[in-house]
Amino acid sequence: MRILIAGAGIAGLAAALALVRKGHAVQVIEQAAALEEVGAGLQLGPNAMCVLAALGLGEAVASAGQAPAAITLRDGRSAREILKVPLGEAAKRRWGAAYVTLHRADLVGILAEALERAQPGALALGVTLAAIDHRPDGVAITTASGDAHSADLLIGADGIRSQVRDTLVGPDTPRFTGHVAWRALVRIDPADPAAPPPGVGAWLGPRRHAVTYRIRPDLVNLVAVTEQADWREEGWNLPGDADRLRADFAGWNALTRLLDRVEHPLRWALHDRKPMRAWHKGRAVLIGDACHPMLPFLAQGAAMGIEDGFALAELLPMTGDPEPALARFFALRQPRTARIQAMARSNGVDFHEGNPLATLAMRLPLGRAAASRPDAVMARWDWLYGGGPGGLHGGKLA
Ligand SMILES: Cc1cc2nc3c(=O)[nH]c(=O)nc-3n(C[C@H](O)[C@H](O)[C@H](O)COP(=O)(O)OP(=O)(O)OC[C@H]3O[C@@H](n4cnc5c(N)ncnc54)[C@H](O)[C@@H]3O)c2cc1C
């Protein structure tokens, strides 16, 4: 099929590569003049790494990043350990792939290069989708510079403010969730005993939490989240004041050395949407944040976009009417992504001690169980990290 993809974020690039590998002719248009991923670090769970391995990129992505040995939840002020989820070799054994943390730009670069090798010229930068004409046997689009393109299928991978989405279900603004994330990349001396410990660290406290992980041995990605009633500032990704960040996390001594080194943090207003009832209409379909934007509290937004792209490529026929495959795609993917959207939201409450029962449950018995039975802790995540590439869970595709 001739397939047009709007948006060269992680979802659009992963979909393009998976579709080209299947033999489809793909054109990706991206409004930005250069591929620049703001926000710096990214965690890729074994579910995403399984897909990337199936696309032949497992080694390249793993060697561009770090493989943390564990995710450790700690109390932000006392640094007391609450729960540890083993990763590293244990993740590979249990879920078939590593858990990787890396620079977003490295992942985007690897995907874009692989796409260029697989189908030279598939990606056009500086091209903005401006208008869409949905037709019975395809789509016709016009770009902002007035060029016309047609395709058998349009994939809207154009992010949380998706224009393709608006033409499918009508305009709607994403909701501010009441969370603001500070984001920064911080250079550290790996030998410094006051540096945050290696691995993924989630530091929890009242109405705030922070996540730290290394994307290179001497480079820590920091995401620090606080609550705020509303967002009245222009834009949702703004330069922030490092002193205000330090004040927000004053007394979190294990992070002090790191926070002292932060120079130019970004402030990021977090938005999401409720799960949607449809992702496709006629010859157009949505993937990634365009159809299931979520809070980052499960670190799965990009992973879900990667899974979407792979699953869509597996399901689409080579010719003919794609609509039945789009319906199957929605039926397969919507429940999984909706579950993850809901869990990310409830983590926002639990991480911030907003749910006293959950906080108690998390802090008391789980920590002890984790130490004595790490397998039991890992088993809780089989539904998310296991199941093979694309969250397809083997037989479901048949
Ligand atoms: C603080 C924070 C931390 C996160 N951490 C993680 C994590 O650790 N792991 C994880 O898996 N996820 C994480 N996420 C989520 C993840 O960043 C997103 O889910 C993911 O980047 C979405 O990818 P996407 O390709 O769907 O959309 P986007 O990245 O938004 O890409 C959409 C693309 O479409 C382009 N576009 C838009 N409109 C048009 C148009 N009209 N014409 C042409 N192009 C257009 C845009 O320029 C953009 O390049 C995090 C998110 C936040 C906010």
Image: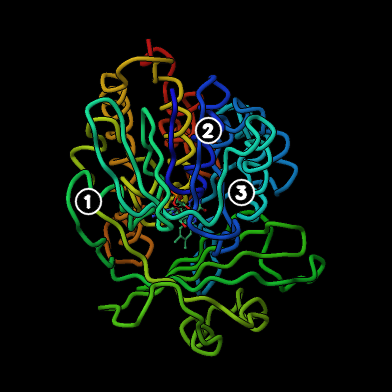
Q: Residues within 10 Å of mark 3 (few under 14, many from 20)?
A: many
Label 2, label 3: how far apart the Cα atoms are: 33 Å
Query: Mark 1 or 3, which is nearer the eye?
Result: 3
Classify 114 as above or below 348. Answer: above
Q: Secondary structure at mark 2?
A: helix
Classify 377 as above or below 18. Answer: below
Residue 274 in percent (x, y) is at 22, 51
- Amino acid type at mark 3: Val
Classify 276 as above or below 224. Answer: above
Q: Is residue 55 left or right of residue 164?
A: right
| 153, 43: nearer the viewer | 153
Q: Residues within 10 Å of mark 2 (few under 14, many from 20)?
A: some
Q: Which residue is mark 3?
A: 108
Task: Name the image quarter holding residue 229.
Answer: bottom left
| 362, 134: nearer the viewer | 134
Classify 176 as above or below 272. Answer: below
- Amino acid type at mark 2: Asp
Labels 2 and 1: the sequence-earlier one: 1
Tell me the quadrant of the picture where the C terminus can be found.
Answer: top left
- Amino acid type at mark 1: Lys
Labels 2 and 3: the sequence-earlier one: 3
- Residue 375 numbered mark, or none: 2
Q: Secondary structure at mark 1?
A: loop
Tell me the quadrant of the picture where the N terminus can be found.
Answer: top left
Q: Is residue 364 visible?
A: no
Query: Mark 2 or 1, which is nearer the eye?
Result: 1
